[in-house]
Amino acid sequence: MTARNSEIFTSPDFHALEREVLERGGSFRFRARGWSMMPFVHPGDVLLVERVDPARLRPGAIIVFHRAGTTNTVHRLIRKVERDGRVVLIARGDNLNRPDEPIGAEQVLGRVVEIHRDGQRIRLDTGPGHLLGLLVYRLAPWRPWRYSWLKRLGRLPWWCVERLTWRKT
């Protein structure tokens, strides 16, 4: 990414445009960067984001949120808590040890509903993709994908799950 593109993605105008598109019922796609959501979201995956009412979010959903002065963050919602009469969301990357700083509902841009990877796609808001996301959420405290012996042991079942959930585009 060039310095100019980096400036565009962190500019307040760009984030205002994203928010306006989502508020008008639109959606946007962008390419994921970083490793914090491995193994579910890989760097280079194209994510489809749609508007969501933060009150309807449930733990396990992959959300996109924005903090002032930073780029968008894509992490999994792990908890909703009420503090001082307002809802606060706690998110964490699947591949991270610690949760993010709490965010307000107004910082949520949307929810990731589809992932495109290598000519295939998986829908996260319905069917097998939704169930796979819940499974990853439930396994997150143990992070089994970090252990090489467990990766080898689980290769066949995950291959079967992958064949059932990913669709050719």
Image (cartoon, helix red, strand yellow):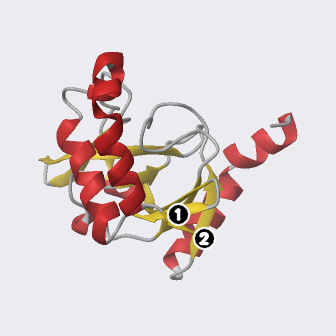
Amino acid beneath label 1: Arg
Q: Is residue 20 above or below residue 15?
A: below
The type of residue carrying mark 2 is Thr
In this rendered view, identify the residue nearer to me: 45 or 109.
45
Residue in the picture at 27% in, 43% down:
136
Residue 131: which quarter of the image? bottom left
Q: For this view, does 123 lie left or right of residue 91?
A: right
Q: Which mark is residue 169?
A: 2
97 relative to 103, above or below: above
Q: Count every numbered label the image shows and give the total.
A: 2
Q: Position of residue 25 (x, y in %)?
A: 50, 82
Q: Position of residue 85 (x, y in %)?
A: 13, 54
Left or right, 38 with reference to 98: right
| Quarter of the image with the C terminus in it | bottom right
Circle 1 — which element? Answer: strand
Image point 50% across, 76% down: which residue?
23
Classed neighbour count for the residue bearing mark 2: other residues with Cα under 10 Å, few (<14), some (14–19), many (≥20)? few
Residue position for label 1? 121
The spot of residue 30 in percent (x, y) is 64, 56
Contact between labelled residues 1 and 2, with CB atoms less than 8 Å apart:
yes
Q: Which mark is residue 24?
A: none
